[in-house]
Image (cartoon, rainbow, N blue to C red):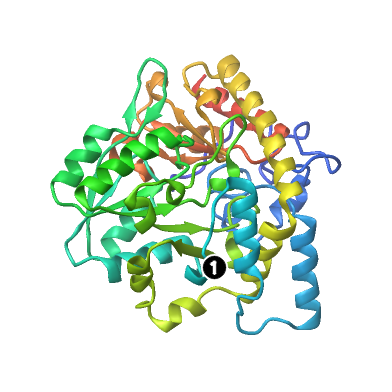
Amino acid sequence: MAAPVTPPSPSSPSSPFSSSSSPSPSGGVFSVPAEELRTRRSTKWREFPADVLPLWVAEMDVRLAPRIRERLSGMVESGDTGYMDPARLPAAFADFAARRWGLSIDTGRLYILQDIMRGVLELLRYGTAPGDGVVINQPVYGPFPVTVEEAGRRVVNAPLAHDAATGRYELDLDALEDAFRAGNRVWLLCNPHNPVGRCWTRQELSAAAELADRYGVLVIADEVHGPLVHAPHTFTPFSSLEAESARRAATLFSASKAWNVAGLKCALLTTRSPRTWGIVEQFCFEVGLGSSILGVAANEAAFGESEEWLDGLLGALAENRRLLGGLLREQVPGVRWEPEHAEATYLAWLDCRGLGLDDPYATFLQRGRVAFEPGTKYGDAYGGFVRLNYATSPEVLREAVGRMAAAVA
């Protein structure tokens, strides 16, 4: 990390907030006071010096949903912190998926493990051969290529298509077909997409699934952001399609992003296919022990009892999205981001190439003292981009954009 320089914002060296922008302690899901946020032990608040405003990692500035908090508090109070048992989590998730998405889950083919990327790693280890090609669509979540390489497989990039006129990203079906035709037999799908925020439509996914059928491709779908789709868009689980590749797909879910419980370690892997389930049954016994009893309880309370809280969160994110779009247009017009294309997640993929900077991430960090994710984490070609996490208070967003403007003034 580059050496700190004096920030151009009015913030004091000991606080990431100016005195006028500290979140109010009352009202709204994002009303956690700045002083409380700064005491958190999570990496979001510990990675950078105290004068840096952190809008980087996918973690929200919220308190836990009440039912999750109550469940965890009761377990800790009673000493219920032993080994994990699935309890009602499979049924709670199946009910949520049916209610929210119209998706039928076979709880007999639902596997609980510590996190989504561990599931991807094990599927690649047991479902493919060393050196096999795995297709991804950059810009995409940084652990995708890292995990493919850790499994001893080859990363094959079929980049998303980007409309320069509108800023919209789409699946590039020609690039996908070229990759599948070349003999690469696995597609690691991000649905909805991180970082560009697209919620792939049923038509888009069906067209891609037809290609996967044609070339016998196994689809591994990371659908952790499925609960975070913004109206009027609707989430289409890949496994809900009629295609054979959808029936064979392995899909991974978790409450980690939508309910802010990533540190509790729990994810779910599902499939409709006996053949794909046979891959899962080969996993080492320890993989199934990786999730924590608290993580299972939190996921059960999230999917089973915290849907109203999720709806409130989505409403607050809609307001933040509109606010962020307006702030960027007014104060940093060289940054391009279209809120209407942010169909899911709470992550904004900012095109900073209009600023003419060699490294926008470093400029905002060093001169503005605001931390985003560098675009290069999502592909080497994206150094002109940064990813901003807008799951925070409106006051923090105003402060962050003000710092961006000051950094490039």
In the image: residue 24, left or right of residue 314:
right
Q: Is residue 223 visible?
A: yes
Q: Is residue 296 above or below residue 67?
A: below
In the image: residue 119, left or right of residue 113:
left
* Number of dots carrying numbers: 1
Task: Look at 55% across and 33% down and name the residue there.
Answer: 368
Q: Is residue 120 above or below residue 352?
A: below
Task: Look at 59% across and 74% down and name the residue there.
Answer: 292
Q: Is residue 11 above or below residue 36?
A: above
Residue 208 sits in quarter: top left
Task: Look at 46% across and 48% down and name the residue there.
Answer: 240
Relative image position of residue 375 (x, y in whole percent): 39, 38
Q: Is residue 54 visible?
A: no
For the residue pair 403 and 252, the one nearer the viewer reads as 252
Relative image position of residue 233 (x, y in whole percent): 56, 32
Relative image position of residue 236 (x, y in whole percent): 49, 42
- Secondary structure state at the residue bearing disc 1: helix
For the residue pair 263 and 334, the one nearer the viewer reads as 263
Relative image position of residue 82 (x, y in whole percent): 65, 84
Looking at this view, name the residue that lies furthest to the left.
182
In the image: residue 231, left or right of residue 271:
right
For the residue pair 2 and 396, the one nearer the viewer reads as 396
For disc 1, the marked residue is: 107
